[in-house]
Image: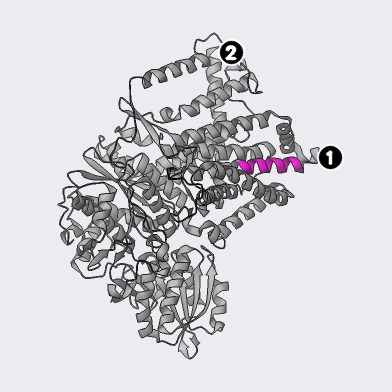
Amino acid sequence: MSKSNFTRRGLLKTGAVTGAGLAMPTIFTSGAMAFTNEPTGDTVTFGFNVPQTGPYADEGLDELRAQELAIEHINGMGDGGMLNTFSSKALGGDGIMGKKAAFVTGDTQTKSDAARASAKSMIEKDGVVMINGGSSSGVAVAVQGLCQEAGIIFMAGLTHSNDTTGKDRKANGFRHFFNAYMSGAALAPVLKNAYGTDRRAYHLTADYTWGWTQQESIQSATEALGWETVNNVMTPVGAGDFSSYITPVLNSGADVLILNHYGGDMINSLTQAVQFGLRDAQANGKNFEIVVPLYSELMAAGAGENIKGVYGSMNWNWQLTDPGTQAFVKSFGEKYGRPPSNSAHTCYVQTLLYADAVTRAGSFNPCAVAEALEGFEFDGMGNGPVLYRAEDHQCFKDVLVMKGADNPTTEYDTLEIVEQTPVSQVTYEPNHPMFGGDEASLGECNDGA
Amino acid sequence: MKMLGLSRKDTTFLLIVIALTLFTPILLQPFPEGSGLATFNAGYPDLMQRFAIFGIFAIGFNILFGLTGYLSFGHAAFLGVGSYSVVWMYKLLGYSVVPGILLAVVVSAVFALVIGFISLRRSGIYFSILTLAFAQMSYNLAYSVLTPLTNGETGLQVYTNDPQVLMGENSPTSPHFFGIVMNESSKLNVGGWEFTFNNGYYFTAIVAILVFYLSMRIFRSPFGLMLRAIKTNQTRLNYTGLNSRPYTLAAFVISGMYAGLAGALMASMDPLAGAERMQWTASGEVVLMTILGGAGTLMGPILGAGFIKYFENIFSKINDNMLHQWFAWMPDGIENFLIGVSHFFVGKSWHLTLGLLFMLVVIFLPGGLVEGGQRIARRFRSRKSKDDGSEAQTQPAE
């Protein structure tokens, strides 16, 4: 061996002895908290888990802006935004139950695995009591399941699939955003007025959970009008080129094309459909029409000219004129110099709703918070009167039917509001077959204790 | 000191690896809680589990790539197959991880046998493309057509109405190994430090040590030598009258089983299996891990796996708010400048940092991080004493 007195064996021995020595006088603590991540200091931490890279990164970044704004308003900085118009006055702009709100951020990469890893690090390392975000239904369902297991609250962000509050609903998860069923129910009457009851629809559907629930919802809503469904073709996600799917549409006998696509897929498929001359075509003696059931500002901007006159639906739009919307658009615009998006709005509202529920419950315990949110009715958040239904943790509110504007003046008003479909028209039973039927259950609330 | 059929040097090496693995929860927590640098602590259960799991994945990949030189771009498929097997066992039998892990290894071996049998008819780039095609096919099938089996985009998970026939009254309701619940931890508070000793981590760590030992034996065996001969010159090997395909197929299956085991452990820590686990990016990641750490070395892939997972989980979480806190003591101009610069390397730009480091490693340390370690060790040795010889070398060069 070497002459150095720094040997491996010596090092190992010393290490072991030191380790044992350190361990002796201390007590192993485990499960000392009343519930997962009970905040003990003078701050309480939220986790904002959004896609910062990948296909939905732009939406994720807008969500982050809104979440940061919500934290400011909760802590009494800025002009208070929607806290001034919110019907519940529990929050006083002095933090939450005397604690200052803080946040950590993470990148979901729009992948369930990465999202769960990021959420886990927030729970295990940063001690968050609530996670908000997720710009994809797959990610939202995955993170919701994780929060349920860990015993914290999940406030879903942009997730439109029926499953999030349908067959995958969880006691610790809440969704403010609307869903595919509501899109179908809201669009149907508008489509009836615009295009009549004698139409033949051709569906192109993104081949995954969200696409299917979306297609199923629209098909049943339009068939109830008397429309006929000619065909439903599945397209791979991220296909890029849809020309081979669009070519057969014109000769299929259909006169409406419904694009159950989102994000980049929708931009590509719509652009190509327009380039193929579908909008100018005639079929069955009628003008050929295109419908995009779920819109977002980002997609509208991406599709440019092509969306003119195309119908779709949204959860919220900054062009609404109620006081809540105006307050939010004002403080968001002042801070970031642009109007907030649909997804930014839902994340902002979810953060405030959580903070408010904690204050009303008087506890950060997830089960107490869940109880405060269940059946909660509120107003002044931009959507009119809203109910957080207790049976499936889904918000029920008016849905916006949108149309591509004919003469947009800026890059932010490429969509115009056609109709505000009243909540009664989009409400369904909690055990609706599209939402898991009678088998779907929230399970037990878990506080991690 | 020789044991378990290892040479003296390897025994020491194995013991060091065991010690490092067991003390990971302490070693990865160098900064006290509440200090500004606590963000850089990595000693929380999920990340430690990932270190061990991706370590296993990379060790297995290295048996194929490091020894035979066959570059597979489809190893993520086995990872996914392993995860799905385990979750199905949860759904059908109950939350014990044992049946799932066994099934996962068997199923991934069968998958690897089929894919390997076809892909290994070609070598070089054609082999890589074939494996990539198979993996991408598995991913697309899992994402859409096979949804009844995989639950598509949402990911396979356990529902309350699943049969779970082996679940008793008092069985734990999350993954466990004979009653040891994976997500339970003990915490140790020393001064300002908090160390988390997680059951799941120790389970994965012990499995990792076992498969590390196995890979060590493979590296040192005649079989390993044969694999290296294939890497060096397969044509010459064929001309000597040896059929090299059974050897490459065996290496492919073994490495597929490692990947399946890693996938199984992922689902053992977190009872969900998603299709993205099979995407080509996941296959690419393990290639990066192996090259970054040092292909063909025993320790390299583990280092590479740790390195990449650390960046993915720690750097991606640093946001501008934290930067403001760190640099708040500086004069405003410098503060804003520093934040502006660092903004491009943290948070959503963590890919950039990782990419730059990867380039630096590949350009200046072609042998990966292991080569860096060896260079440092060599410098120390030459400075300290000339007669130290090779004994102080802890990392075998390949």
Residue A156: in sight, yes or no? yes
Q: Quadrant of the N terminus of chain A?
A: top right
Disc 2 residue type (three-letter): Asp
Give the vertical position of A4 relative to B324 (above or below).
above
Q: Residue at x 54, y 22 (%)?
A: B377
SS assignment for the magenta stretch, majority: helix
Q: Give the mark count.
A: 2
* Relative image position of residue A245 (x, y in whole percent): 55, 73
Figure coloring: one colour
Q: Which residues are magenta?
A: B246-257
Chain under label 2?
A: B
Which residue is at 68% across, 51% downward? B115
Q: Is residue B345 magenta?
A: no
Residue identified by numbered label 1: B239
- Residue count near mark 1 (Cα–Cα under 10 Å), binned few <14, some 14–19, many ≥20: few
Q: Residue at x 31, y 32 (%)?
A: B33
User: Is residue A123 left or right of A203 when viewed as pictured?
Assistant: left
Dot placed on the residue nearer the N-terminal end, 1 or 2: 1
Residue A111 image point, x, y percent: 46, 53
Give the spatial CA distance, label 1 vs label 2: 43 Å
Residue type at tag 1: Tyr
Q: Could you tell me which residue is drawn at 45 percent across and 56 percent down? A: B161
Identify residue for label 2.
B388
Name the outermost residue toward the front: B169
Residue B367 visible in the displayed image:
no
- Label 1 resides on the chain identified as B
Indicate the secondary structure of the residue bearing disc 2: helix
